Image: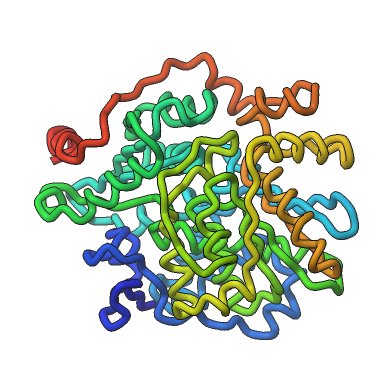
Amino acid sequence: MKLYSTNNSQEFYSLKEAVMKGLPDDNGLFMPKVIPTLPKKFFTDLKNYSFKDLSFEICKHLFQNAIPEKDLSKIINNSITFPAPVVHLDEDKSILELFHGPSLAFKDFGARFMSQLMSYFNQGEKKELVILVATSGDTGGAVAAGFLKTKGIKVVILYPSGKVSMLQEKQLTTLGHNIEALEVDGTFDDCQALVKRAFLDEELNKRIRLSSANSINIARLIPQSFYYFEAYKQLETKKDVAFVIPSGNFGNLTAGLFAKRMGLPVKHFVAATNANNIVPEYLNKGTYISRASVPTISNAMDVGAPSNFARMLDLYSLQWNGMREEIKGYSFNDDATRKGIKEVFDKYNYVIDPHGAVGYLALKEFQKQYSNTKGIILETAHPSKFNKEVEAQIKKKVNIPTRLSELASRKKVATSIGTDFDSFKSLLQKKYS
């Protein structure tokens, strides 16, 4: 498997180089040179594949012998250990539940796969690998759970102070061992900027082996494409299929575009955002303007400069018309989101989290124009992670799974830092070089 940078399509990297570097030196993002179309027989037999089996087949074709099949099978078996069920609200609206992993968020799929892949590639290395992660909520918890106690790897998680829920914060700050949390006095975009700058700092990279576990790392996107196939496998419909993706950094949607390029018969993707509506604005007007992120109750989508937009542009060869033909964008504020939570509960007796509620609202708008569609909303996090907000709307207690509730009493351990890069760099050098 060969990959290139979105800033330079003429220089190629191996899968190991792309995964372990995280970012190319030119500050682009890694993209596969070839996204293969899967064989027709794969789709004919799709319903007979287990989740693990279809994930293996996708990887086998995409990786093109970059990893021996025996080792790849082991990576898949250790990664895809929880389900992704589709729950039907009505004939035209369904939910793909992606919160059945250890951190109760969709990012568990990417984090567990990445930890297995990095551990495989890290064999024989004498110097430890330090993974930098910026999180707006769910990424950090998933990465912490996925990499906990992984030999030879340390994880440093940067999160915006006061902008994640209490239980999300406990997932980042209470595990210890090889996981360290940095509480940043700023926004997610500030956290992401520190991480990106660290990868581009030559002195830092000479002293520390750095990599990323954000969706800027291609190893996060690849497994997120698996559950689009798993969802499609569970459908019984002759209507056009549209996936509705609550979106922040747009890695999840980009993974869906990978799935479509591999042959999954998806008609449309719906980019559902909160007040941070940079990509819907681009889709509607053709103008991309990044801006400071706005705090919302769907905090995992509070991104003002989505990194994976560069990959989306690359997939569509910078063609606005091509992108807006396949992707429709909608945004909703917090008041609308709260009403969406209540409506889903009142109408379908289903408890949905704020991110999923944004997806539900987007699907309703989308189906006004595209009525002959089967819409699948990606429910990206368990509603208990936002229990106060959800309970206020449905007037009912939300069940908190034990693996999350037991964190509430644990002591938070985090180092407070500002947004100054030199101070961040100094901290990393002192602890890890």
Depicted 337 relative to depicted 59: above or below:
above
Q: Does the rendering let one see residue 100?
A: yes
Q: Is residue 174 left or right of residue 138?
A: left
Render colour scheme: rainbow
Q: Quadrant of residue 377?
A: bottom right
Depicted 405 relative to depicted 425: above or below:
above
The residue located at (48%, 49%) in the rendering is 112
Tell me residue 215's x, y (percent). Answer: 44, 55
Numbered label tally = 0
The residue located at (27%, 60%) in the rendering is 21
| Viewer-side residue, 407 vs 216 | 216
Depicted 357 relative to depicted 305: above or below:
above
Tell me residue 69's x, y (percent). Answer: 47, 71
Q: Is residue 89 left or right of residue 149?
A: right
| Viewer-side residue, 416 vs 139 | 416
Depicted 248 relative to depicted 346: above or below:
below
**Quadrant occupied by the C terminus:** top left
Q: Is residue 36 left or right of residue 52?
A: left
The residue located at (69%, 39%) in the rendering is 337
Tell me residue 32's x, y (percent). Answer: 41, 75
Q: Does the rendering let one see residue 115?
A: no
The residue located at (39%, 37%) in the rendering is 187
Tell me residue 207's x, y (percent). Answer: 11, 48
**Quadrant occupied by the N terminus:** bottom left
